[in-house]
Image (cartoon, rainbow, N blue to C red):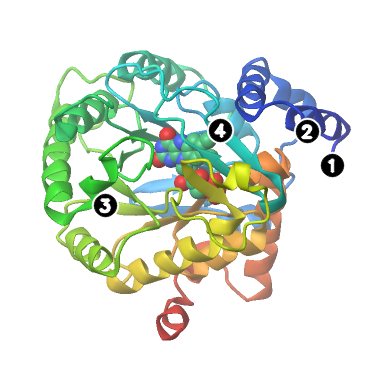
Amino acid sequence: MPFLSRMTMPLLRSLPAERAHSITLKALQMGLHHTLGLKPALGQEAMDRLACQVWDIKFPNPLGLAAGFDKNGEVIDPMLSLGFGFVEIGSVTPRPQAGNPKPRLFRLTKDQAIINRMGFNNEGIAAVAARVASWRSSVRAHPGVLGVNLGKNKDSEDAAADYSLGAARFARISDYIVINVSSPNTPGLRALQSKDALRDILLRTRDSLQGAADSPQGLGADQTDKAPPLLVKLAPDLQEQDIQDLAALALEGVCDGLIISNTTITRPDTLKSPQSRTNQTGGLSGAPLYEASTELLAKFSALTQAQIPLIGVGGIRSGADAYRKIRAGASLVQLYSGLVYGGPESVGNILSDLADLLQKDGFKTVQDAVGVDVQYYAKT
Ligand SMILES: Cc1cc2nc3c(=O)[nH]c(=O)nc-3n(C[C@H](O)[C@H](O)[C@H](O)COP(=O)(O)O)c2cc1C
């Protein structure tokens, strides 16, 4: 672990979780990542093995930053410079929102996990889109792909209108758009995962996305009339019937990809942290989410017959974890909690271990490994 990182990580962990997060964001905005010297030193062969194309987008590698870390798009470049192949910002809601009362973010250190009930605290579409547009038009230091994750305002009656608004605003300045219907911290949100509700949201959002992409007064720098892919982020706590219904819905062609998964409202018996922590309401992420989210990923891969790209997220801490998700059907993977516990150098470590594992198993590219274990999961 580099010297500066060895000094700063224990300091950050000694602070309340949300305070540590704000300090991290500030430090990254001020350029701390440069002083850490963390740019992963991957050889050309490893980079070639990790580079991939999903939809029409070229990703330098399949490891992304999950939504929630950079809700307002303040540290896109610093996070790309750590080695992430893509960054997903948000969730962003149409109007700014303060989120739930603090404290609302809890570390479960013994479990390498986090519980959060942030409640979509964010600066709102206008402020975030202005920041993203300026990032887009700047000369960028790092290649990388940007996803924008959309939420709905807590007091909004028409969820589809909220998502449509976000989609229109980000259509020309993002590489992909995510409809988040799976956060446990906005009342009623997860009910939008029912097949009919979700179909309505996706069709309306899709129209709005295409309308904005076609508009001659594009909002950003990219001169394209192709709408970015539209993804849906799902919860790990879906019932069997929901899983079947949602896979069938995805096969109708109403969306271009699925992200599996968001945080869980369950509390596995295996948790070791004090009850005062594990009893906190909110979504649980990190190591205890790994198995369930990976099994769900494999299930969706099987049900959608690998026709729809999937992003696997939940509990990734190592190259081996990322590799298993890819073999379980993920074309791309993301992490958040692993970064909190593993520190910024975990990005480079995961990438170089992943490249080694692919090579060891004879995969020329990461794409060749996608879904090779899906049948194994189907049998267990
Ligand atoms: C503090 C925190 C805030 C989050 N906020 C969001 C969010 O705004 N939108 C979203 O789609 N997911 C959000 N997530 C979920 C993550 O994107 C991810 O799906 C989940 O944490 C599982 O991945 P992990 O185990 O690698 O953390 C949040 C997670 C955490 C820990």
**Residue behind mark 4:** 105
Residue at position x 70%, y 55% from top?
A: 352
Near mark 2 (Cα within 10 A), the count class, few <14, some 14-19 or many ≥20, is some
Mark 3 belongs to which amino acid? Answer: Asp
Q: Going by the image, does 332 lie left or right of 251?
A: right
**Residue behind mark 3:** 256
Nearer the observer: mark 2 or 1; the answer is: 2
Q: Circle 2 sits in a helix, a strand or a loop, which is it?
A: helix
Nearer the observer: mark 3 or 2; the answer is: 2
Q: Circle 4 sits in a helix, a strand or a loop, which is it?
A: strand
Q: Going by the image, does 35 lie left or right of 238?
A: right
The verdict on label 1 being within 8 Å of ligand 1 is no
Mark 2 belongs to which amino acid? Answer: Met
**Residue behind mark 2:** 9
Mark nearer the N terminus (3 vs 4): 4
Label 1 – label 4 distance at C-alpha:
26 Å
Q: Going by the picture, which residue comes out furthest to the front? A: 276
Quarter holding the N terminus? Answer: top right
Q: Position of residue 301 (x, y in %)?
A: 36, 68
**Residue behind mark 1:** 1
Mark nearer the N terminus (4 vs 2): 2
Rendered position, 194 above or below 186: below
Label 2 – label 1 distance at C-alpha:
10 Å
Mark 1 belongs to which amino acid? Answer: Met
Rendered position, 57 above or below 140: below
Near mark 4 (Cα within 10 A), the count class, few <14, some 14-19 or many ≥20, is some
Mark 4 belongs to which amino acid? Answer: Leu
- Circles 2 and 1, Cβ within 8 Å, touching? The answer is yes
